[in-house]
Amino acid sequence: MFGLSSIELAVMALAGLSIGGVMYALMLPSLQAEKVRKRRMSKVKSVKTDTLSKRVEVDRVQEGQKRRKQITESLNDLEERNKAREKNATKPNLKTQILQAGLKLDIRMFYIYSAALGGGSAFAALIFGFPAIYCIGIAFAAGLGLPRWVISFLRKRRIKSFLAEFPNSIDIIVRAIKSGLPLNDGLRLIATEAREPVQTEFRRIIESQQLGMSVPEACLRMYQTMPCSEANFFAIVIQIQSQAGGNLSEALGNLSGVLRSRAQMKAKVAAMSMEAKASAAIIAALPPIVAILVHFSSPEYIGLLFTTDQGFLILGVSAVWMSIGVFVMRQMINFEV
């Protein structure tokens, strides 16, 4: 029985192996096809994933390039506008200079006042006995030179007053933005509460907005009436923030710090050059002082300068040379920061 059972088991095992081999042989193509399909599916998925990631990366790179291109175009546009504004600000016409000086004076009245001043000065010189040729020179100096010098003096004084108050105004705008107010409210606050001439300049910005101009364009126009680099910096910060975005309060806060540092540097340079300025002032004042002392000690000796044609010629040439010397000394001690 045991031998028969072994044979039967062997036959059954062989039969099972045969059936398994036949079934494997029959199912082998389908198994291989399934493996190939799975392999292809995995490759397709990996390709799709790689393609998607590459597409996302390409889109990110293109977006970055597009943003950089947009910022570059904005900066180039700002640079061209700044060059045009700087050209108009560094060499403005007489009407613009009067506006920058803060005077409400018509150009026609300015010429009338200049002509009256020149004619009056020439008439006074003629009464005091000056020759006619010198009276003509005095008329030109008083009618053309003196009024424009006054406009230039008032213009520089107004710019100096603006720079003294401008950083404080920017700090107020920064606090207003941090407290949740929009930029327009901060500008209106300065236009109503700040000191002159900052109040007038920001009031012009508000008036330009009411006429339909955008805030960046209105700020850019401030450089025409206030020709200083600090006003230009403020306009550029507003323009870049409006186009590229960013934290405006932080940008304006940094600008305020830069303006204060520039003011400190200017004060330090002015203090260091004060000795040279005092020396130049003493040297320029020596000839008139010596002439006055000689007039009190020996009036007949120096009186020839004011009573003869040769004396008038010497005085004119001396005045020209003294003016050249003062101008050269001024350029040597005038430091731009």
Image (cartoon, rainbow, N blue to C red):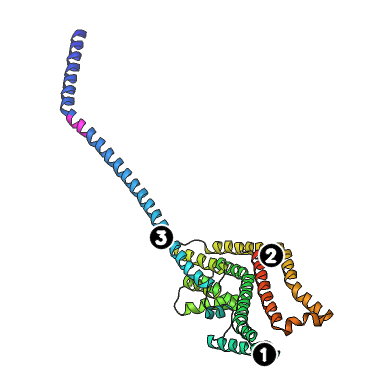
Q: How crowded is mark 3: few (under 14 residues within 10 Å), some or many (20 or more)?
A: some
Between 281 and 76, the one lying in front of the other is 281
User: Which SS class for mark 1?
Assistant: helix
> Relative to 202, does residue 62 appear above or below in the rendering?
above
Distance, label 2 to label 3, CA atoms, is 42 Å
Q: How crowded is mark 2: few (under 14 residues within 10 Å), some or many (20 or more)?
A: some
Number of numbered discs = 3
Distance, label 1 to label 2, CA atoms, is 42 Å
User: Which SS class for mark 3?
Assistant: helix
The numbered disc on residue 126 is 1
Q: Mark 2 belongs to which amino acid?
A: Ala
Check disc 2 and report the residue beneath it.
Answer: 270
Q: Which of marks 2 and 3 is nearer the N terminus?
A: 3
Residue 203 lies left or right of residue 314; in this view the side is left
Between 247 and 323, the one lying in front of the other is 323
Label 1 close to label 2 by CB (< 8 Å): no
* Residue 194 can be seen in this image: no
Between 117 and 174, the one lying in front of the other is 117
Residue 95 lies left or right of residue 288; in this view the side is left
Locate residue 186, reporting x and y percent. Answer: 55, 72
Residue 145 lies left or right of residue 20; in this view the side is right
Q: Residues within 10 Å of mark 1 (few under 14, many from 20)?
A: some
Magenta-drawn segment: 29-34
Locate residue 83, reporting x and y percent. Answer: 48, 67
Q: In which quarter of the image is the C terminus?
A: bottom right
* Residue 327 can be seen in this image: yes
The numbered disc on residue 94 is none
Check disc 3 and report the residue beneath it.
Answer: 70
Residue for point 68% across, 76% down = 319
Residue for point 61% across, 73% down = 159
